[in-house]
Image (spheres, coloured by chain):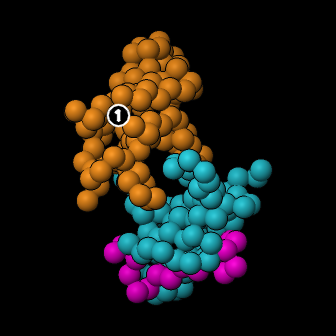
Chain colours: A cyan, B orange
């Protein structure tokens, strides 16, 4: 088990550029989540996938943001026309399929991608 | 909606001191409650959890009890070590997504 991985770990870009982040969940985890964490705050939910289906998007996810999870494996988060306010740590988490009487499954977090928009 | 309020930091303690970080929540239904820890340069790790009222979560000497009557989930440790220096986040899970507090930075001095 290699854990959740994210790439890149750091990204510096100029305002107006597009960026794309990748998340590889723990294998066989069917649920995948994206969160955003700004300095001095806790993570905030952005979006959630169950397999390849995107089931919820937060109001924080403006039209400039898009997330995909083709084939229900890795996921990408793209930000178009970046703004300085997009500077944050973008966290990905995954959790396994709920089975039997288990109603809770721990979310395992990746190390995050730190985005700086100049 | 769901929300979490936790004690503001930073908190600075001497080794072997008692640590408590207050956490209260607002939620509909019966959420699960968590404490996550973020060590310097590392990702979020689950420290402990409680899934129903009166449950006590514990791990690495840390404890927290799910108090429904006071909507609280305070984190405690009787004797901290320098290695406990980190940012601690209280969180709740209603359906599937986590709602986090702002985090409390704890620094333990030798």
Left or right, residue B72 beside residue A71: left
Residue A21 lies in what quarter of the image? bottom right
Image location of residue A50, percent across then percent down: 57, 70
Label 1 marks a residue whose chain is: B
Which region of the structure is painted magenta? A59-75
Residue at left offset 33%, top offset 46% = B30
Residue at left offset 49%, top offset 86% = A80
Q: Which residue in the rendered view is the most extreme toward the left? A: B70
Residue at left offset 40%, top offset 87% = A63
- Magenta stretch holds residue A64: yes
Q: In this view, does B77 lie above or below A106?
A: above
- Magenta stretch holds residue B38: no
Q: Which residue in the rendered view is the most extreme toward the front? A: A100
Q: Is residue B87 above or below residue A80?
A: above
* Residue B24 shows in the view: yes
Label 1: how many Cα within 10 Å (few below 14, some 14–19, many 20+): some
Image location of residue A8, percent across then percent down: 66, 67
Q: Which residue in the rendered view is the most extreme toward the right? A: A1
Residue at left offset 70%, top offset 79% = A71
Image location of residue A27, percent across then percent down: 74, 60
Which quadrant of the rendered structure holds the N terminus of chain B? bottom left
Image location of residue A107, percent across then percent down: 56, 52
Nearest the eye: A10 or A29: A29
Nearest the eye: B89 or A108: A108
Q: In this view, does A65 lie above or below B2?
A: below
Q: Please give the count of numbered marks on the rendered protein.
A: 1
Left or right, residue B84 beside residue B33: right
Left or right, residue A39 beside residue B48: left
Q: Is residue B1 above or below residue B29?
A: below
Residue identifier under label 1: B53
């Amino acid at each position: 088990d290699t854990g959740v991985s994210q790439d890149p770990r750091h990204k510096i870009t100029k305002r107006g550029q597009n960026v794309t982040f990748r998340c590889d969940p723990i294998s066989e985890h069917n649920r995948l989540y994206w969160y955003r964490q700004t300095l001095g705050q806790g993570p905030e939910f952005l979006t959630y996938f169950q397999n390849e289906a995107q089931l919820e998007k937060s109001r924080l996810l403006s039209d400039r943001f898009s997330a995909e999870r083709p084939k229900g494996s890795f996921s990408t988060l793209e930000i178009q026309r970046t703004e300085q306010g997009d500077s944050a740590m973008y966290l990905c988490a995954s959790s396994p399929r709920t089975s039997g009487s288990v109603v809770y499954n721990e979310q395992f977090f990746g190390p995050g991608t730190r985005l700086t928009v100049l | 909606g769901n929300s979490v309020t936790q004690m503001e930091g930073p908190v600075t303690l001497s080794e072997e001191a008692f640590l408590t970080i207050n956490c209260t929540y607002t939620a509909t239904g019966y959420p699960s409650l968590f404490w996550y820890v973020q060590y310097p340069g590392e990702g979020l790790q689950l420290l402990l959890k409680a899934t129903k009222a009166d449950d006590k979560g514990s791990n690495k000497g840390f404890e927290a009890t799910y108090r429904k009557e006071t909507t609280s989930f305070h984190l405690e440790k009787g004797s901290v070590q320098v290695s406990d220096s980190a940012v601690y986040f209280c969180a709740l899970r209603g359906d599937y997504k986590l709602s986090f507090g702002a985090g409390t930075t704890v620094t333990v001095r030798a």
